[in-house]
Image (cartoon, rainbow, N blue to C red):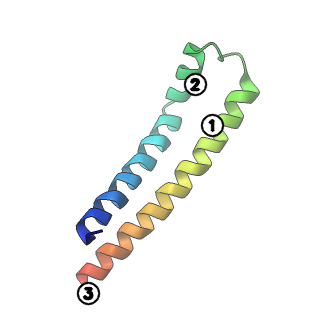
């Protein structure tokens, strides 16, 4: 795999994590689940939001760290 291709993969992973964090922060997940008929299941929504937030924040940090390392390596 070329070096340029791996950078795009890292960048897309970082953007996906940012999207999921915004998805949770702006309340779109609750709207989506309410549209599916799960709006009254408060505990289920809380668990799903926690799991998605945990995965999104970890992905944000991991992909962000990888992008920072690549940028730092190219600047040296």
Q: Earlier in the sequence, mark 3 or mark 2?
A: 2
The quadrant in which residue 37 appears is top right
- Name which quarter of the figure residue 38 lies in: top right
Q: Residues within 10 Å of mark 3 (few under 14, many from 20)?
A: few
Q: Where's the N terminus, which quadrant?
A: bottom left
- Residue contact between numbered discs 1 and 3, judged by CB atoms under 8 Å: no
Label whose residue precedes the other's in the sequence (1 or 2): 2
Query: In this orientation, which residue lies closer to the viewer: 33 or 21?
Result: 33
Q: Is residue 21 above or below residue 4?
A: above
Report the residue marked by disc 2: 30
Helix, strand or loop for disc 1: helix
Image side of residue 73 versus residue 34, left or right: left
Secondary structure category for the residue under label 2? helix
How far separated are the C-alphas under marks 1 and 3? Answer: 40 Å
**Percent x, y of residue 39:** 65, 17
Residue at x 63%, y 37% (from the top left corner): 49
Label pair 1/2, CB-CB below 8 angstroms:
yes
Residue shown at the point (31%, 79%) measured from the top left: 72
Q: Residue furthest front?
A: 1
Q: Position of residue 32 (x, y in %)?
A: 53, 21
Residue 35: image location, x then y, percent: 55, 14
Q: Is residue 2 above or below residue 60?
A: below
Question: For the residues marked 3 and 2, what is the alpha-carbon distance in whole angstroms?
Answer: 45 Å
Residue identified by numbered label 3: 76
């Amino acid at each position: 795999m070329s070096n340029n291709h791996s950078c795009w993969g890292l960048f897309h992973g970082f953007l996906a994590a940012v999207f999921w964090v915004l998805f949770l922060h702006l309340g779109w997940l609750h709207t989506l689940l309410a549209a599916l008929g799960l709006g009254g299941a408060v505990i289920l929504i809380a668990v799903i939001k926690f799991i998605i937030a945990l995965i999104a924040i970890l992905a944000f940090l991991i992909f962000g760290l990888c992008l920072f390392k690549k940028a730092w390596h190219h600047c040296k």
